[in-house]
């Protein structure tokens, strides 16, 4: 039974090693492509190709349908108060990418026209996409190497509680630490790509990845405890 279990562990390690090797080949190819793309995009003039997209939303409120109307005095007062509020809160479209473009208040109707910028794109910004893609693939390659080391340890082990296996599990967990931050950069890069700017707002810690790291470390210490029990059992025998 023991030999059969070890044989299956070795077989799974062998399969994992093969799959990891294939994944590393494709990752290296992708890394080369993105690296070349990063260098090429660095030479694209900033204003070579730009595009922007806007959207408009028209809101119409019919007071007449509710059987209510405003007097001329109320219309004038409402216009003054609303314009004052919009200027104080900087909600007019002139002051930001999003806001109220036009406003029309009459005795029996209120119309508001909202405008917003959906995207402000420059082809030069693809530099940041390529740069982060290269970083992403580089981190993936590093992780694949650690996964490969673990699979090779399983492939050659005589027991899953060997010190070499435990070390490789811990090393894999530590290799995932940069992912806890890198995983949150996807939305930031996309925002930079479509806003024609670069900022780091929104980068934080991925709690799901932190939990994954903690779970792998916990498994490593479980294996380590199993190794102690196995040693005590061997010494007893």
Image (tube, rainbow, N blue to C red):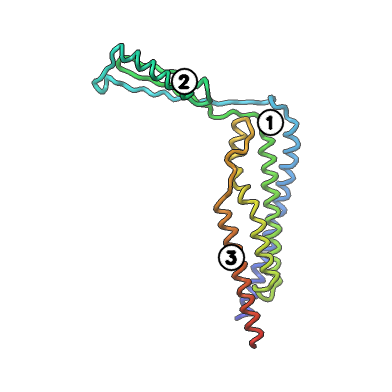
Tag 3: Cα neighbours inside 10 Å, few (<14), some, or many (≥20)?
some
**Badge 2 is on which residue?**
87
Q: Secondary structure at mark 3?
A: helix
Give whichever of discs 1 and 3 has the lower sequence position. 1
* Rendered location of residue 150, percent (x, y): 68, 64
Give whichever of discs 1 and 2 has the lower sequence position. 2
**Residue at left offset 35%, top offset 19%:** 110
**Residue at left offset 39%, top offset 24%:** 59
Q: Nearer the viewer, residue 87 or 165?
A: 87
Q: CA distance from mark 1 to mark 3?
A: 45 Å
Tag 2: Cα neighbours inside 10 Å, few (<14), some, or many (≥20)?
few
Examine the rendered structure and indicate whether residue 209 appears above or below residue 120.
below
In the shown orientation, is residue 67 left or right of residue 42?
left
**Residue at left offset 68%, top offset 24%:** 47
Q: Nearer the viewer, mark 1 or mark 3?
A: 3
* Rendered location of residue 158, percent (x, y): 69, 76
**Residue at left offset 33%, top offset 14%:** 75
Q: Secondary structure at mark 1?
A: helix
**Badge 1 is on which residue?**
124
Give whichever of discs 3 and 2 has the lower sequence position. 2
Which residue is situated farthest in the top direction here?
A: 72
**Badge 3 is on which residue?**
218
Q: Quadrant of residue 70?
A: top left
* Rendered location of residue 40, percent (x, y): 75, 35
């Amino acid at each position: 039974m023991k030999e059969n279990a070890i044989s299956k562990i070795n077989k799974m390690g062998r399969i994992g090693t093969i799959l990891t090797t294939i994944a590393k080949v494709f990752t290296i190819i992708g890394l080369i492509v993105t690296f070349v793309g990063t260098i090429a995009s660095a030479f694209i003039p900033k204003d070579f190709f730009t595009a922007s997209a806007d959207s408009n939303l028209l809101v119409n409120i019919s007071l007449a349908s509710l059987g209510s109307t405003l007097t001329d005095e109320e219309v004038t007062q409402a216009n003054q108060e609303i314009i004052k509020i919009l200027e104080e809160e900087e909600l007019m479209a002139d002051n930001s990418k999003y806001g109220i473009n036009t406003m029309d208040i009459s005795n029996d109707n209120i119309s508001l026209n909202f405008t917003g910028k959906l995207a402000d794109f420059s082809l030069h910004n693809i530099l940041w996409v390529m740069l982060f893609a290269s970083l992403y693939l580089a981190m993936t390659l590093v992780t694949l190497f650690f996964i490969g080391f673990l699979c090779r340890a399983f492939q050659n082990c005589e027991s899953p509680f060997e010190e070499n296996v435990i070390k490789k599990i811990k090393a894999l967990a530590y290799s995932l630490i940069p992912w806890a931050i890198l995983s949150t950069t996807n939305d930031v890069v996309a925002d930079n790509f479509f806003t024609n700017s670069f900022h780091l707002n929104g980068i934080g810690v991925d709690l799901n990845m932190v939990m994954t790291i903690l779970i792998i470390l916990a498994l490593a210490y479980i294996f380590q405890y199993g190794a102690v029990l196995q040693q005590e059992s061997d010494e007893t025998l």
